[in-house]
Amino acid sequence: MKKIHLFAIFLFGTIAAQSQSYIGFLTDNYSGVHGVINNPASIADSRFKADINLVGLSALVGNDYFGFDLNEISNDDYEIDDDAKRFPKGKNTVFGNIDILGPSFMFNLNEKSAIAVFTRARAFYNINSINGNNVTTLEDGFDDNQDFIIDEGDAYASTNIWSEIGVSYARVLMDKDEHFLKGGLSLKYLMGLGNAYASTNNLSINYDADGTSAGQTTLGSVETSGDLGYGYSENFNDDVELDELDITSSGFGVDLGFVYEWRPNKSEYTYKNAEGNDSYYRDINKYKLKFGLSVTDLGYLSYDGNEDRYDINATVSQEQFEDIEDNDDLDNLYTSTSKKLEDPLLPTALHFNADWNINQKFYLNLNTDLSLVDREQINTSSIANIVSLTPRFERKWFTFQMPFSVQQDSGFQWGAGLRAGPLYIGSGSVITALFNDETKAADVYLGLKIPVYHNRPKDKDGDGVFDKIDNCPKDAGPAENAGCPWGDSDGDGVLDNVDNCPNEVGPSENNGCPWTDKDNDGILDKDDSCPDEAGIAENNGCPNKDNDGDTIINEEDNCPNEAGSIDNQGCPWGDIDGDGVLDNVDNCPTTAGPIDNKGCPQVTVEVQKALNSYAKTILFDSGKSTIKSQSNKVLNDIVAILKKYPNSNFKIEGHTDSAGSNVLNQNLSDSRANSVKVFLIENGITQSRLSAIGYGEDKPITSNTTKEGRAKNRRVEINLVN
């Protein structure tokens, strides 16, 4: 028998398509606008200001029937029929892919949202459930004098070519602590270029070599059973050229996706913007683990055209069967029915992606693409399920990845790809193809784009405030003052950040405000014992009412009828603590102490250690000299210790770590030391006993290279002067 025309046409289609595209490249954080192919959420919070794709092509072919040696296939003496290995089984499949991403772009609307516009052309042709044993039988050929039976059963083939214009929108949905979630949606207008399909139902062919006789010649007969159908859109015929296809259909498609990121080190990538809100460095990946979930190609296309289906339960001569060339010949032999073309099923798929950021350079990605469409349906485009594990080296201008995949029907694939600035090129199977003489699938992708990356904000003065929000980009200053150094508007020596009266001259003891004289008696309120009643200097600003003539007014005289000393509230001096030092010269009249220390106890080494132990726990507001309220108890404990040694003078020292500029650290340490001094004075410690000085970062007690070291260097010390 020379040919089995109908069945051969159905079995030997050689081009097919499925939706895996750009294998390995889509896992790159710098894939840009390509990310919408698998998950539209990927473009939000991306590493791009904008990404413009000029042109990109991804193509894939594969099957589970033939195994090729691609190193030999280009040789003139290599014959597929003779040299390719075969793996026939009851249900063989052929598949492949052509996916063209045309001019497309994405850009950020703001820090939380992004948009993309893309153009795309796609071609699908699936051949499923072909009995490979029959294919082998047909390839081997038949003797016209030998009977044979082909039992095919149910089989399906389809092709669908369309283009897309799509718009994607993605947005951050949650940003709380270490949890980050974004979502995206793509809406696609589909323009159908052509569709065709064929299917069999319970098909069998029985050739009887001795079926009929004509004179001295014996002719075979062909008994067929089941049914055979095919359909195609009006412009899809054997003579059409791809560039001549007209748009004969339209439809709509939807892609939906979400991406979750776990960001345990969020603080390392956060800074304060001009409004005082948290912002992120947008040039760096902030996740440790990332998970993506999406569904693509939800939608429809509808073509005009007819399906012709034939009931082939009949017996015809070998000559009649071999003369079948087109549907007119089929109409002459078999019963035909016609109905509207079945609408093609889009290759709806579920995609899951997990990405591990090992160290900002090396990543490990797990990607799974699963078909949501049953491939054993009429006029179906469906993907081949695939699981890929892709290690990659990734930087801003360069990525190299090596995907390891297990693909439905084609088995294990090992590929490689790279991105170098505007160029991207690679294959999910190139290494397998080079070293395997039974290659069942091969793919390649390449293209050009114009990437516009986010850059790290500049900070010329090194004060930690980026230039775009720094009001003084050439002079270091704290973030609280918009990056400008603190000034002294009134010239009183108290910096404005700790000056309660920045436009009036005043001493540091009064937080930069001038002392007042409410009773106008010429004695400042700080020295006036009667600030609301006019008095005289000799009576500490109080009116002079003195019965015993000791110059102490009666209201303040504990012994109004007995002359005494002003320093003893008008009473004669005694020796309350019995230490041999009269109270008038005893700096500690209620606490015994030696004469050489003016009757006061002496500060011991243990007391000095206790003071500094307390002082190191004083807490300030970040970057300021204001003392946090939870430190009041510690300060009151310090006050209690200092009051026990009233004739001892102390120096309050402020220290910082090395973060920030030296000038900034000097000012901050000085302000903090003075804040402690003011608190002690306001709580009963004589001003003359205290001095305050800041040493900035000049006297570290340990290394500033570690977080723990810097924390120890940020401290306040209170040390005995005499």
Image (cartoon, rainbow, N blue to C red):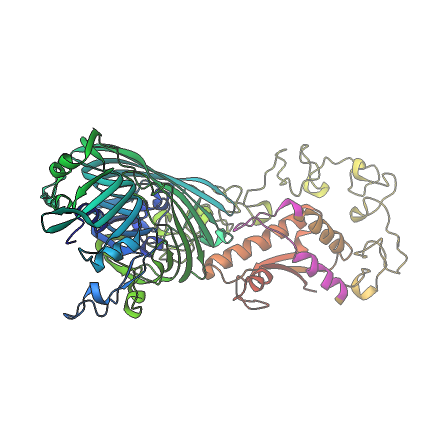
Between residue 270 and residue 508, name the one nearer to us. Answer: 270
Looking at the picture, does residue 556 appear above or below residue 648?
Answer: above
> Which residues are the magenta region?
606-630
Residue 662: image location, x then y, percent: 47, 61
Q: Is residue 205 left or right of residue 279?
A: left
Looking at the picture, does residue 292 appear above or below residue 300?
Answer: below
What is the quadrant of the C terminus in the image? bottom right
Between residue 592 and residue 13, name the one nearer to us. Answer: 13
Q: Give the mark count.
A: 0
In this view, the residue farthest toward the right is 578
Q: Is residue 198 left or right of residue 655?
A: left
Residue 396: image location, x then y, percent: 32, 58
Question: Is residue 53 among what the camera can see?
Answer: no
In this view, the residue farthest toward the front is 215
Looking at the picture, does residue 462 appear above or below residue 205?
Answer: below
Looking at the picture, does residue 663 appear above or below residue 564?
Answer: below
Quadrant position of residue 712: bottom right
Residue 291: image location, x then y, percent: 45, 49
Residue drawn at 14 percent across, 50 percent down: 218
Between residue 375 and residue 162, name the one nearer to us. Answer: 375
Residue 607 among magenta residues: yes
